[in-house]
Image (cartoon, grey):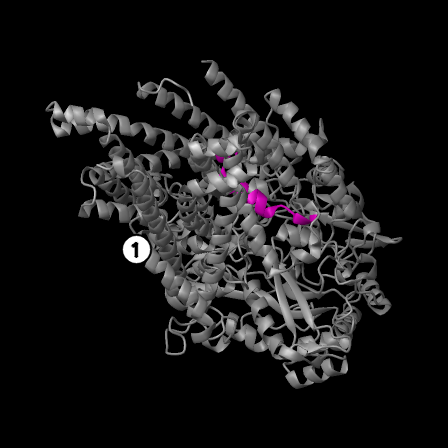
Amino acid sequence: MGVILSRLLQSLAVLLAMSFAVYGLMGLMPGDPIDLMIAGDPHLTAADAARLKALYGLDRPWTERWARWLGQLLQGELGYSRLHARPVIEAMGPAVLNTATLMAASLTLALAIALPLGIAASLRPGSLLDGAVNLLAFASVSLPVFWLGLMLIVVFAVELAWLPAGGMTEVTGDGGGRLAHLVLPVSALALAGIGQYARHMRAAMINEAGHDYIRTAKAKGCSPRRVVLRHQLRNALIPITTIVALEVGGLFSGALITETVFAWPGMGRLIYDAVMGNDFNLALSGLLLATAMTLVGSILADLAYWRLDPRVRRMP
Amino acid sequence: MRRLLAASLLTTMLAAPTVWAKDELVIGITQFPATFNPSIESMLAKTYVLAFAQRPVTAYDASWRLSCLLCETLPTLENGLAKVEGKGIAVTYTLKADAKWGDGQPVTSDDVVFSWTVGRHPQSGVASAELFRRIASIDVKDARTFTLHIDKLTFDYNAINDLRLLPAHLERSRFQPAPAEYRNRTAYDQDTTNPGLYNGPYRIAQVVQGSHVALEPNAHWGGTKPAFKRIVIKAIENTASLEANLLSGGVDMIAGELGLPLDQSLALEKRHGARFAVITKPSLTYEHLDLNLGSAVLGDIRTRRALLLALDRESMTRQLFDGRQPVAHSMVPPPDWVHADDITRYPHDPAKAAALLDEAGWKPGAGGIRVNAGGDKLALELVTTVGNRSRELVAQVLQAQWRKLGIDLRIKTEPPRVLFGETVTKRKFSHMAMFAWYSAPENVPHSSLHSDAIPKADNSWSGQNYTGYANPAMDRLIGSIETELDRPRRKALWRELQALYAEELPALPLYFRADAFVLPKGLKGLEPTGHQDPSPYWVESWRWE
Amino acid sequence: MRAGAVILILLVLAALLAPLILPEPDTLDLAARFAPPSPDHPLGTDELGRDLASRLLHGGRISLAVALTTALLAAVIGTIVGLLAGYHGGLADTALMRLTDGVMALPLLPLLIVLAAADPAKLGIPPDAMTSEGFAVGRLVVIIACVGWTTVARLVRASTLSVRARDYVRAAVAVGASPSRIMLRHILPNIASPIVVATTLSVGNIILIESALSFLGLGIRPPLASWGNMLTGAMDVVWSAPTLAIWPGAAIFLTVIAFNLLGDGLQKSLTSTSRRSDAR
């Protein structure tokens, strides 16, 4: 357990360093929304701008603001979002939920398709099926996501008119249709993920097949089906778990483009707008959450590794 | 997967009929309003959404005349409701008897005083405090009548479009205890769907953060009843997706104020003219190139004129924008009543442009680029906003047209916050900046042309005279126009100003932008205004036919 | 692998030969906007009447140049970090690997956005240098490389650890060769193959990242053409002129898949020669 404690401490150090770096980089962004307001409104004077900057604390050096922000955070205060004029938690809440829905659905779909494909391909390496899966896998990781998204909209929403083109629910009537609105963005994200999961699954299965215990099991006369399912698959799933766990944090904030194309108000969009609008509190909280998810994911992956694989009794 | 698809098919089929129900209207815009308080921080999406639910006291209408929205009669010197007092003026307004907040409370002079108090409070977070500073004091005559004492006499003394009313009965208790916290405590963001916050024909009934805002009729609205039972404003940032939503029936119309770029709308009209009507109206949004007059090249008037003569703006707007965006000759657009026609124009004339460049010392050099006696190349840099497709296209056309005359143009694009927050405001652009001015009708260009509005370090970069243009004659004209109350005399002064501008070319006029409204066939009564007061101020006249 | 290599060779050839066969990519013809394919314009013209084929190939030069340079730079950074960590071990190893883990844990896209929006002037880079097109491209290269070096660093560290234990390295240490000499002369050549594979595989990814950044307006900006910004620009007119989106989309797809196939092939052939005994 000491190992886990040290991992947690390391993760905290990473989070701290990241918040400092992001604060600094955002401070390095040229211009700021208040200067932008001066340009947009001829009646706004320099005095007005100075007053507003003081009001939002933007006139202080960023290191000082970062220190104050950290102090607040340690007291459990995330502060107010400057853009949304409400507490960060309140501004972030719905977006976290929306992203979690999108992420869970697309990850499930991607795995549901990718794992069987990877397993099937691994059973007959070099076969036609293997080649087809391989090609599909490469195709899925080689498409720009926004292009794929728009093509899905063109085909399924506009030409065939089967599915809504964007948004989360029907905005008219009773506001239903959540499921229908999920299909296209989930498909776009899942399609982009299938490739790597299928390839990893196949590689892991083939790797396991080379181990002695599988040969022994086969030699003992176990049915091939039983060997594959009971032994090979079980062990091959271990590396997959690691990969998925590591992927979660990235998906959490990295679905920005899918969210933009499908008008899905999630975390990617929220963080992007916060960064662009110098909303330090909101941007930092969003980024920290995403990073923390990756870190927790990797710790969980290690734990799972340790649990599932009796051969590994050593924490990496 | 198949089950999922089948289920979704079912839901869309069930949902499909409601899309075309006549008492609902779904409007697509490209931005979601981050906040809803009308006074704090202006943002186009917020202005647009609130225009359905909030009425200012006065506004410019679609024919660009000032009109009363919440007041009974527009006060003027002629009708005696405005009186000159010393250097300033006293203007008396009477609120409409049927003006009510959505909870049935009448809109009163007290609301006016409260809104002014919030507006002038230094910590309230109100961005534009100019109007509130101009109003020195307010006399309340009765619950509906009040007199504003404005400390400076200008011809637009009765335009108080920026005075947006806040309901004192709901907001005062949130403001008074801690004005510095008001921006985080306002009911507009804490309790957005409270009907008492809105005095327009609609009230905000539902907000789904980042997705859409639903409006429903305000039960206490005293004016003409609006035609729709529900209006939904849906934010779709990506314009290609926005168009897809329109084509698939997810939205019924796209607002011009925050909608598709013109060329995209025109392409849409070509393909789907039977389903949608695309309305464009040239606006007073003035697309132009601000020139850095401090640079050696552009300080020479001959070079500036040659640059403009070298451009074929007519064919550019005809071919790129179907001729919908009229070529500009000064900053005053044709629909403005002070627009003058008889000023110097610069039609496409390459020969004359070449002669002027020769005269200014720029002779054709190696590689087709002109050079001066010192061997410097005639190379200019143009900076504009990234992500504005029309501007990116136009910049590349300018580059090609100038190249023919031996002028080398380098294009640089920057995000708006950089361009407007740093590059132009601190006059850091080396030669040209392409952007637009967006304003009200008969807007005096004091901040962009007066010599006291040149941003400098010692005035902490205030003012919008980014070109650095300083001409006593221009300063005088601006001063006289601002205080000239007689319309014919003012029009004459405006003509002089435009003539001087066209003569001196502190900026190169390009064209007046036209916003494209994409409406379903059958939706009538929507009239684009072409200025900063958005079309939903007149939503009562929208209807299906 | 062979298919990947063939596609890439054809692409590079086409990009190099483009100026000889096709018209200038910047020649405008407003009268011929959105023209269909013709002998003069084999793929038709774009929204400003420019030759699409020519822009596609010139855009390809930029996209490929950016991707290859970035991949190389990331490989160099990753190799240095991995070598130092693997060779020296101990505290250096722990520090460098925790750094690597930290960077890997960062959310990539938001980080790229913050980096792309930061102001180089505040870092003391002279404003004159920033106006050139080269700077814009270079900035993108540096930004992506800054977050993309981690995979190589981990691979190199692992390989270094195993190579370091071999006899010839020990011998070199024993005769008193300097650490940098040992790392460069003795270790690096023996761990080259995983570096090559990882770098090849990363090229495709970088092309995709560039297109994503272009989509957000933070990538390479017009008038300089890249596949990413051509595709982004074509999105708005996808209904009236779908070919404008299809061609750069296809170019990105083909190139990325080619690099992936090549990398995959390299991996198979390199590992099978080194581990022939393990083969089934």
Reply yes or no: does residue C113 show up in magenta.
Answer: yes
Horizontal side of residue A306 vs B210, given as left or right: left
Reply yes or no: does residue C165 show up in magenta.
Answer: no
Residue at screen point 22% across, 28% down:
A232
Q: In this view of the protein, can residue B407 be seen by the observer?
A: yes
Whole-percent x, y for residue C62 in the image: 50, 60
Whole-percent x, y for residue C138 in the image: 57, 53
What element does badge 1 sit on?
helix
Whole-percent x, y for residue C163 in the image: 43, 34
Q: In this view of the protein, can residue B113 be seen by the observer?
A: no
| Callout 1: chain | C
In magenta, the rendered stretch is C103-121
Single out the residue that lies furthest toward the top: A1
Residue at screen point 79% across, 44% down:
A47
> Which quadrant holds residue B132?
top right
> Which quadrant holds residue B391?
bottom right
Single out the residue that lies furthest toward the right: B86
Single out the residue that lies furthest toward the front: C175
Residue type, mark 1 in image: Arg
Horizontal side of residue B539 vs B153, given as left or right: left
**Depth check, front residue: B354 or C95:** C95
How many discs mark residues in the rendered view? 1
Label 1 neighbour load within 10 Å: few <14, some 14-19, many 20+: few
Please name the predominant secondary structure of the magenta segment in the image.
helix
Q: Name the residue under label 1.
A: C2
**Depth check, front residue: A192 or B254:** A192
**Depth check, front residue: B144 or A34:** A34
Quarter of the picture containing the C terminus of chain C is top left
Whole-percent x, y for residue A98 in the image: 43, 35
